[in-house]
Amino acid sequence: MSDDRIVLSPEQKKRRRTRSIAIAVVLAALVVLFYAVTIAKMSVNLEGVGG
């Protein structure tokens, strides 16, 4: 078997890392958003049950 690996230039490595960090930040923001919406919905439901 031949060793046909793709070799990335430093510029490409930097762009890949930047893109990966951006995706991670967006994913974390979505997780926080879903968590906040879930907590808000639960607190609204609890207010209706207790009253």
Image (cartoon, rainbow, N blue to C red):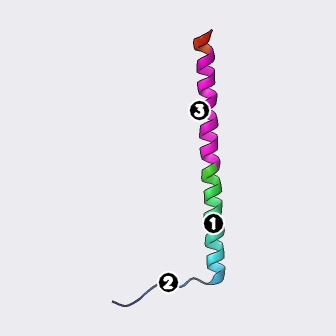
Measured in 3D between alpha carbons, the distance from the residue under mark 2 to the one under mark 1, in whole angstroms, is 18 Å
- Compared to residue 41, the image places residue 24 above or below, namely below
Badge 2 is on which residue? 6
SS label for mark 2? loop
State the image quarter where residue 10 is shown: bottom right
- Compared to residue 21, the image places residue 15 above or below, namely below
- Compared to residue 42, the image places residue 31 above or below, namely below
Label 1: how many residues lie within 10 Å, few (<14), some (14-19) or many (20+)?
few
- Name the amino acid, label 1: Arg
Q: What residue sits 66% from the left and 68% below the top?
A: 18
- Compared to residue 11, the image places residue 38 above or below, namely above
Earlier sequence position, callout 3 versus callout 1:
1
Query: Does residue 49 belong to the magenta stretch?
Result: no
Q: Where's the N terminus, which quadrant?
A: bottom left
Q: What residue sits 62% from the left and 78% below the top?
A: 12
State the image quarter where residue 11 is shown: bottom right
Earlier sequence position, callout 2 versus callout 1:
2
Q: What residue sits 61% from the left and 31% below the top?
A: 39
Badge 1 is on which residue? 19
SS label for mark 1? helix
**Magenta-highlighted residues:** 29-47
- Name the amino acid, label 2: Ile
Q: Where's the C terminus, which quadrant?
A: top right
Label 2: how many residues lie within 10 Å, few (<14), some (14-19) or many (20+)?
few
SS label for mark 3? helix
Q: Contact, CB < 8 Å: mark 2 with mark 1?
A: no
State the image quarter where residue 17 is shown: bottom right
Label 3: how many residues lie within 10 Å, few (<14), some (14-19) or many (20+)?
few
Measured in 3D between alpha carbons, the distance from the residue under mark 2 to the one under mark 3, in whole angstroms, is 43 Å
Q: Contact, CB < 8 Å: mark 3 with mark 1?
A: no
Badge 3 is on which residue? 38
Measured in 3D between alpha carbons, the distance from the residue under mark 3 to the one under mark 1, in whole angstroms, is 29 Å
